[in-house]
Amino acid sequence: MIDFPLIAVVLAAGKGTRFKSEKPKVVHQILGKPMLWYTLFGVRWIKPQKTVIVVGHKKDEVINAVNCDGCEFVYQENQMGTGHAVYTAKEYFKDFDGYVLIINGDTPLVRGETLHNAGEYLKALIRYEGADLTNYRGYRNKSIAGVVLTARVPNPYGYGRIIKDKDHRVIKIVEEKDANNQEKQINEVNSGIYFFYAPYLIQALEKLENKNAQEEYYLTDVIEILRQEEKYVYALEIPDYTEILGVNDRLQLAGVENILKERYISFWALNGTTFHNPQSVWIEFDVDLSKDVEVHQNVVLQGKTFIDEGTVIEPNCIIRNSKIGKNVKILANSYIEDSEIQDNAVIGPFARIRGGSVIKEEAVIGNFVEVKNSVIGRKTNARHLSYLGDAEIGEEVNIGAGTITCNFDGFKKHKTVIKDRAFIGSDTMLVAPVVIGEEAITGSGSVITKDVPDKALAIERNHQKIIENYAEKRKKKYEKS
Ligand code: UD1
Ligand code: CA
């Protein structure tokens, strides 16, 4: 957290032409959340007293997508450059005796800690200059105008190049399209993340011109303007260049998504989760893993998902917004959504558990079984080929292969209740609403339309007819014709 007066301005008005998309660039998703969400997460980390987001192109879509409590939005009707975008937000800082953090909305990988460290660096610079830091006020007329975060990148193409003096004071930033061949060789680039002293920023923004290759008002020109007045912006080179990667096209979007995923995987791997072929695993921000969890290849973990100790997830499983207990086995190709699986249960292979289901301890849900909005009791087995929807199933029940809860009459959904230790014969159709009593039994192939009392057998089936020697008779019939 930053302990000096700070307002954040996030730039998100651009169209993102290079995305070739109907959607504004900053709402495109990275690991299930809009790109801008991550930028804001970093900003929130340092708790600025206000966060202002500059929106423009399809602004309502951007505002809805970020759904940011406590953020304020300003509208930049025509996108005339990053300098113009910041100027649009000037009402928020024009009389502000403090600092403005400016950050491009298309820089999702920056860490909150890095922003914090940049703030600490700024404080150290000011302190070095001998200013009174007791409240960071009255700083006017001193020479430090701010800090820009930079990094050396493997491919600087497209970024503003940093030209600085030996004291790390930036002389100017040259955009790709305005750079000469020599400048293009520079691999230290502008992150698009800056801290400026607000009164200086305002003065310089008012002097911006758009005499450049793109005829835009470049925010980066502020630095050169201030330098002419002997007010300096210092370059803070950060070690991990991936944090400053900007996303201008979908290839960069994919690259950034991979880097973020790798970060999450390293975090969990170092906290006791085993990943097999981690490159193939998908894991989102709100996923929470415990020690001795084992995640095999092509597993997708999405939304708010918690997985407890010792659980194994075999290849090709998708788990979304679900809570998985201890020592659960989720066998290959299973799909679990908005559900809870309790300790020692076994799911799959090829099982589908849908919204609102609870699978209790030691229950087994086997191959080609679909469970929807149902509670499956402790030690209950449904091992093969079933549909269990809107059902409440007790403990130690056996659900035979091919059992179906007929829960929908074409208009409404109805409930099936199966009490403890009942035995449902294979291929039973349970026409809901229906209640199967404790230890009751249904005969294979029965269509059960009425409640079955405790311990009773319900069988709904024609008597079997035997015709002796039928095979011979049939043969003869064909021989004649
Ligand atoms: C910008 C920097 C460049 C830096 C790079 C880092 C300038 C002139 N250049 O270039 O030095 O290396 O970011 O990623 O600042 N935006 C608005 N309104 C506008 C224009 C842009 O809100 O009128 C927003 C965009 O939505 C985007 C951000 O500002 O989120 C940056 O704009 P973009 O066009 O992507 O700048 P770059 O060319 O990447
Ligand atoms: Ca950009």
Image (tube, rainbow, N blue to C red):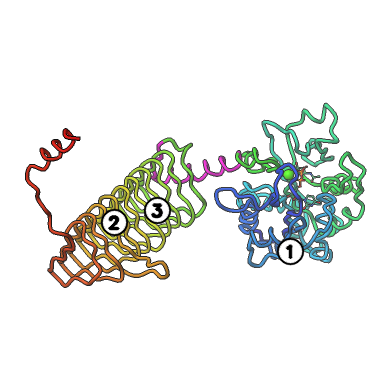
The amino acid sitting under disc 1 is Phe
Which segment is the magenta one? 255-276
Residue 183 on image: x %, y % = 82, 30
Residue 9 on image: x %, y % = 74, 58
Residue at 21% over, 68% down:
436
Q: What element carries label 3?
A: strand
CA separation in Å, label 1 and label 3: 38 Å
Q: Which of marks 1 and 3 is nearer the N terminus?
A: 1
Q: Residue 336 carries which label?
A: 3
Task: Indicate yes or no whether the magenta region holds residue 423.
Answer: no
Q: Which mark is residue 343?
A: 2
Q: Which residue lies furthest to the left in this view?
A: 468
In this figure, which residue is indicated by the disc labeled 1? 73
Proximity of marks 1 and 2: CB atoms separated by less than 8 Å: no
Few, some or many residues within 10 Å of mark 3 (<14, 14–19, 20+): many
Q: Which of marks 1 and 2 is nearer the N terminus?
A: 1
Q: Main secondary structure of the magenta part?
A: helix
Q: Which of 321 and 261 is in front in this view?
A: 321
Residue at 41% over, 57% down:
322
The amino acid sitting under disc 2 is Asp
The amino acid sitting under disc 3 is Ile
Residue at 75% over, 38% down:
159
- The answer to whether 466 appears left or right of 33 in the picture is left
Q: Can residue 421 be seen in this view?
A: yes
Q: Is mark 1 on a helix, strand or loop?
A: strand
Quadrant containing ligand 2 reads top right
